[in-house]
Image (spheres, rainbow, N blue to C red):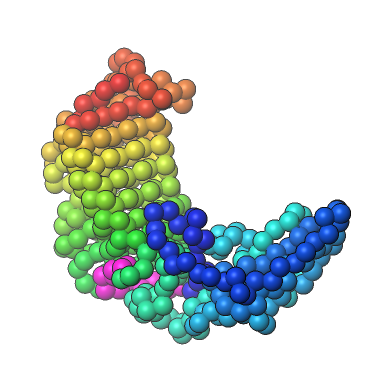
Amino acid sequence: MFCTGGKPIEDCHHVVCRELNFSKFRIAVAIDSAETGGHTVSFDINGGEGTVPVSRRVIEGGNLALPGAGGFFRGEYGFDGWNTMADGSGSNFNAGATFTPTDSVTLFAVWRLGEPPPSGTALADWLARLQANAQTCGSYVLQVNDDESTVPLTLSFPDRTGITVTLVGNGSRRVGLSSNGSVFTVGPGVTLVLESGVTLMGRPSNNAPLVWVNEGGTLVMNSGARVTGNTNNNGGVQVGGGGTFAMNGGEIVGNAGNGVYVETGGTFAMQGGEISGNSANGNGGGVYVAWNSTFAMQGGTVSGNSAGNDGGGVNVASGGTFRISNGVIYGGNAGGGLANTANLAGAALSNNGTAHRGIFRNGVFDAEGILSTTDNTIRVEGGNLQP
């Protein structure tokens, strides 16, 4: 597990972070204003304590050896090099590496949380370690090295907020359930990011969605991640009131129940990925949008889903809102609502921004008229297409 030292306060929106005063540790370096033709490399110990390495001026085309942690530390964390971004999302450089700047830059210390547990340690044990040590505005990456079966896990950090936990697979890895429940319940102030190589796997007769996003929690799903195989009509992802789900890629496929269920007050933004092959006993096989909740579709595909009642693809309850500015909806089986079904009404948005009302017949959309749009958007409320 690689753990970075937390986002800067200004990047942690709507979060009250601890104010850390490092002024007594900083060293001011005066650079002659007449000096030109070079770049300044500064260092930020990113939540640590001790002496900040002195800024260095490097001539054009020159280089320097990056310092180690000779004069600074951070509790149980171990120093793990430098990064061009405070949250660890930039370029990494090892201590002692030769660094050739192309512009003036600040490098941020990267921290890992003590010594990692032994290889093969269960995901639940990793998260227990995070539970004890994660800090407000911290960003942590867990790498899944083997297929495993876990008890239901809750991401919740009392008295701390703005915490991001990223799950990435070392190759293609499955995380299944050893007992009924959600693989992850995402609590307030927590963002769970599912990255490439991770498959969350359901179980027969499960009694909960595979991911449940509670109020104040956020789920982000990126390319290469999968949520699949849940049964007993509990589906893939459930977004609670005040929760947020951003789907940038990946697949939610083959679940019994809604692919995505957006509860009252929840928000689902789809920019990529695929929701397919899900089947609900009630409404909204692909996506169900409850009263006072929002589904904003800006890309991706919803296809081949089914429902026992209305909206094989997307069903919007009265008072719910669906907006589409890009993406594809087709196939499936059910009636009513925004049907996304064979031989039933739906809508499509072409690449040039023209919106059409029409009929899906066996996965092929036949336009039967043009819908007026505002800002290249179709708005759907209560199952009815509106300009």
Q: Residue at x 39, y 48 (%)?
A: 247
Image coordinates of residue 275 in percent, x first then y, are 33, 45
Residue 146 highlighted magenta (yes or no): yes
Quarter location, residue 309: top left
Vertical side of 295 occupied by 180: above or below: below
Residue 352 in sight from this viewpoint = yes
User: How many marks on residues?
Assistant: 0
> Of all residues shown, which one is farthest toward the top?
369
Vertical side of 336 occupied by 280: above or below: below
Which image quarter is the C terminus in? top left
Q: Is residue 315 left or right of residue 186?
A: left
Along the line of sight, which residue is nearer the eye, 301 or 323?
323
Q: Residue at x 70, y 64 (%)?
A: 42
Q: Residue at x 28, y 40 (%)?
A: 294
Q: Which range of residues does the magenta coloring cover? A: 145-156
> Of all residues shown, which one is farthest toward the front?
24
Q: Is residue 112 left or right of residue 328?
A: right
Quarter location, residue 61: bottom right
Along the line of sight, which residue is nearer the eye, 317 or 347?
317
Residue 47 highlighted magenta (yes or no): no
Q: Residue at x 77, y 64 (%)?
A: 30
Image coordinates of residue 32 in percent, x first then y, are 83, 59
Image coordinates of residue 201 in percent, x first then y, are 31, 63
Residue 254 in sight from this viewpoint = no
